[in-house]
Image (cartoon, helix red, strand yellow):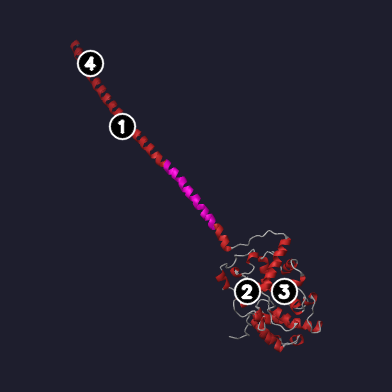
Amino acid sequence: MKKTKAAKSTPVKPVAKKAAKKNAQKATAASGKATGVAKKATATTKKAAAASKKAAPAKTVAKKAAPAKTAASKKAAPAKTVAKKVAPAQAAPKKAIVESHAALVRRARRINRELAEVYPYAHPELDFENPFQLVIATVLSAQTTDLRVNQTTPGLFAKYPTPEDLAAANPEEVEEILRPTGFFRAKTKSVIGLSKALAEDFGGEVPGRLEDLVKLPGVGRKTAFVVLGNAFGRPGITVDTHFGRLVRRWQWTDETDPDKVEAAVGALFPKSEWTMLSHHVIFHGRRICHARKPACGACPIAPLCPAYGEGETDPEKARKLLKYEKGGFPGQRLNPPQSYLDAGGIPAPPLGAG
C-alpha cells in the first residue's frame, strides 16, 4: 500500500510543473502576438490620423475655394441685375414727372405750340359742307375710320341732302348705304332719329348750343364739340381715342372718362385754344404717336414727352412708321382744305377706287 502511494505522488509534480511552464510560455507568446497586433493597430491608427491630417487641408482648400465661387457669383449677380435694369429701359416705362401745376401748364402749352408748328394745316378729318353734314358724319364715325365715313357720305347726302329728306327715308335703303361703316343698323336708326328731331324740334337746322345738341339721338359731348368747334366756331375739346391716349402719355391727366379728361385738359389752356388743340393732338396721334408703336425717333416733341421710348427710337426706323402726309400716303378726306394740299397732303380715294 505504501509503495503504491509513493508511485502515484512522485510523478505528478514534475508533469504539472512542465504543463504549467508550457502554458505560461504559450500565454506569453499569445500576449506578445496581441501586443504586436495592438502595435500594428496603433501604427495603422497613426497612419490614418496622418492621412486625415493631410486630407484636412484639402477640405480646407475646398472650403476656401467655396468663397471664390461665392465671389464669382457675387460678381456675376450685378450682371443679372443690370440685365433686369436694362429690360425696362427697352420696354421704356413712363417716367414719373413730379411738377407743380404751373410747370404742367407751361409744358402742356409748349407742346401745343410746337404741334401747331408741325401741323399748321390741322383740321377736322371729316368731309362736310354744312353743320347737318358734319353732325351726321360725326355720328357715323363711331367704331370706324374717318376715311370710311368720307367714302360713304357722298352717296348718302346725294340721296338725302336735308334733315327732312333723311327723316322720311326708307331705313333699309339707308342701311345699305351705311353698310361699309359697320354697325349700320344702329347708325341708320341714329341718323334717321336725329334728322326727325332736327326737322320737328329745330326747324330743320342744327342747333348751335351744347345743351340742345346732346339731346339729339346719337349725339354726345364729343360729337357736340366737333360740331360746335368746326361748324359754329365755338371752342370745344374733342376727346376721342387719340386725344385721350396722348394726354395720358404726356401726363396732362390720368383720367380715362372722356368728360373728366375734357375738364382736366380744358383747365390747362385758354378756352380760345380748345378747338385747335384738339386738332393738333388728334393729328399727332394719327401720324406719329400711334397706339401700338409710336414713332418716338421721329417725334418733334420727344424732349417734352414722359413716355418717350415706348415706341421705336431709331430715327430711320421711326420715319418708316409715319402715316398720311408725313409718310407720303393719302389722307382721310376726299376734299381736304387747300392748306393741307399745299403741305404735301394727298386726297383720299373715293369708295371702291383701286
Residue indicated by mark 4: 13
150, 139: nearer the viewer: 150
Q: Nearer the viewer, mark 2 or mark 1?
A: 2
Whichever of callouts 1 and 3 sits on the residue coming sooner in the sequence is 1
Q: Which amino acid, by three-letter code, is at mark 4?
A: Lys
The N terminus appears in which quarter of the rendering?
top left
51, 209: nearer the viewer: 209
Q: Mark 2 touching mark 4, by CB under 8 A?
A: no
Left or right of 352 in this view: 131: right
Residue indicated by mark 2: 287
304, 191: nearer the viewer: 304
Q: Nearer the viewer, mark 3 or mark 4?
A: 3
- Label 3, label 4: how far apart the Cα atoms are: 143 Å
Q: Which amino acid, by three-letter code, is at mark 1?
A: Lys
Left or right of 54 in this view: 74: right
The C terminus appears in which quarter of the rendering?
bottom right
- Label 1, label 3: how far apart the Cα atoms are: 106 Å
Whichever of callouts 1 and 4 sits on the residue coming sooner in the sequence is 4
91 magenta-colored: no
Numbered range of the magenta stretch: 60-83
Residue indicated by mark 3: 276
Residue, x 57% and y 70% (percent of image)?
318
Residue indicated by mark 1: 40
Q: Nearer the viewer, mark 1 or mark 3?
A: 3
Question: Which secondary structure lies at badge 4?
Answer: helix
Left or right of 81 in this view: 286: right
Whichever of callouts 2 and 3 sits on the residue coming sooner in the sequence is 3
Q: Which amino acid, by three-letter code, is at mark 3?
A: Met
Residue 161 placement: quadrant: bottom right
